[in-house]
Image: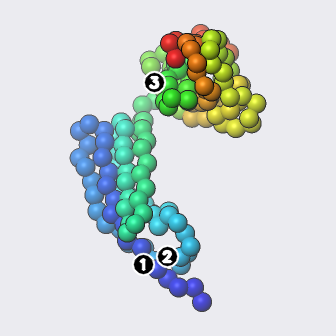
Amino acid sequence: MNKIARVEFKFFVAGAAAYPHRHGVKTRDDDRLGNLDPCIGMEVPMSCIDGDFIVRAEAKDLSDEITFEYQTEHWGKPAELRLTRIAPDLIEAQLYDENGIRCLDSSDWIEFSIAGDGELLVNQGTATGSRRIQAANGRATIRLRSLTGPCVVGARCDGLPSALMLDL
């Protein structure tokens, strides 16, 4: 017979400049005592406006946090490719329409390249280790290895101007 554990967690929602902070307590009965994440499957009551959000859940000795961007604007077909460094060893390419709105449904193929004193982690068969990869939600990422000097990372997508990131 499975034991039932009562799991209680506090949640906190913050973000999107003018959006008021929300918080509260949720409870659920859990028959999966071995589960390391007590908040899995829990729903946090919130309505979003466009912008960046942070949702944090705390339960006894465990906590978890997610950060996400909520977008409701309508977008057109991809017209621009932009590169951003999102971690010291991770570059992200994103597809935008002619009005600068991210194309969340784009699954175009993106190909990464590098010149200079660094190398891309490629031929890994993973979402961050492939030179040529299909965008997911209008994004693709690639990992860099040991930059010993300056380098330039490039990305290209058929039908769009290439994007370059200098001075890495």
Residue to which mark 3 is pinned: 101
Q: Is residue 126 above or below residue 154?
A: below
Residue to which mark 1 is pinned: 6
Type of residue at label 3? Ile
Q: Which of marks 1 and 2 is nearer the N terminus?
A: 1
Q: Nearer the viewer, residue 77 or 86?
A: 86
Type of residue at label 1? Arg
Circle 2: element type:
strand
| Contact, mark 1 vs mark 2 (Cβ under 8 Å) | yes
Q: Which mark is residue 30?
A: 2
How far apart are the two marked residues, 1 and 3, measured between alpha carbons? Answer: 44 Å
Mark closer to the observer (1, 3):
1
Type of residue at label 2? Asp
| Residue located at (42% from left, 31% from top) | 73
| Contact, mark 1 vs mark 3 (Cβ under 8 Å) | no
| Residue located at (41% from left, 51% from top) | 65
Dot 1 alpha-carbon crowd within 10 angstroms: few under 14, some 14 to 19, many 20 or more:
few
> Is any part of residue 108 visible from this angle?
no
Q: Position of residue 76 (x, y in %)?
A: 52, 23
